[in-house]
Image (cartoon, grey):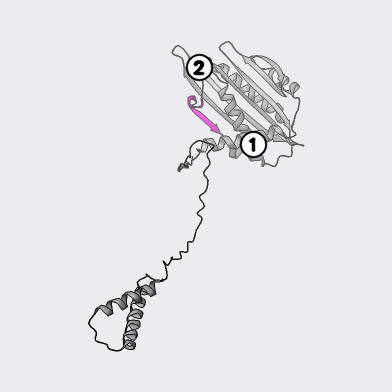
Amino acid sequence: MDDAAKLNQRTGSLLRACPIYFKEEKMIKAFVAAIAAILIVSMSSCGYIGGEQTPTETTTTTELTIPTMPTDQGSLTMPVMTSETVTTTTKSEAELKKEAMDTFLAEFYSSKISFVNIGKIVSEAVKTSPLDHKEESKSGQQIVTVKGKSGSGNIDVMRIDLTKSGLDYEVEYLLTTMGDHYFDKTINAVKGISKKDFSTNYKMTSKVVSKGKYQQYAFAQKTDGTANQFIYVESYAVIADNKLTVVTGHFVSTDISERQSFCKLLEGLRGKLST
């Protein structure tokens, strides 16, 4: 017997137990049917009839992809942000001049220059000097070592043919650069002497270069506590017939007359090499 039939039977029993208000059996049956219908509807709305209703659930799955971190290094190292400070160094005038000279000399001596043999001219010029002298040829240059009773010095003489050099410099720049280079080199060759020791440092660039010539010389007097030393340094350069001639030398003596003899020797060399 189903639930509805059981409910009808139970309802009928209850009504029969009550005082009889209805006389006709048809009225009783109609009343019982109505009560049963009301109870069935009420119980269905409460979920007691028709079995359990299983709710339907909809599940949406979203896959989250997590990047795999490298494990071969054992640990994760975070980059360190650093800031760099850019320091700009301003070069001095002397440093810029030295760089320019070094660049010029490298180009000059790597070009197709050639040295001219002037040994005979040098020998002719020095043979009349009262100072003892010794000549030698080295790397295209004529080197003259001079010596007196109270001092000594050196002279370097060279003549360079520029015909095939391919250099494209103005005569003034070439003479000034080469002259300054050999003047500084000559001063540095004097032991115990620097440019600061010279009381006179006269440079006739503007006048002499206008005639294709360069000359710079300097005098100095220095004492060692027992005697005075007289020092003379000179560099001379000239360009003629596409040939550069350089005469540079220094002399140190405690006898000022020997320094004068050295100056005359340089003058004789300049004269011979200019003809």
Residue 84's disc is: none
For label 2, the residue is 229
Q: Residue at x 33, y 82 (%)?
A: 32
**How many numbered badges does the structure rendering display?**
2
Within 10 angstroms of label 1, few (less than 14), some, or many (20 or more) residues?
some
Q: Quadrant of the C terminus?
A: top right
Residue type of the residue flagged with mark 2? Gln
Q: Which one is earlier in the sequence, the residue at label 1 or at label 2?
A: 1
Q: Nearer the viewer, residue 146 or 52?
A: 52
Q: Secondary structure at mark 1?
A: helix
For label 1, the residue is 104
Task: From this view, report whether residue 155 is shown above or below residue 274.
Answer: above
Q: Which residues are magenta?
A: 192-202
Q: Residue at x 64, y 21 (%)?
A: 155
Residue 210 seen in this snapshot:
no
Q: Nearer the viewer, residue 71 or 3?
A: 3
Q: Quadrant of residue 265?
A: top right
Q: Secondary structure at mark 2?
A: strand
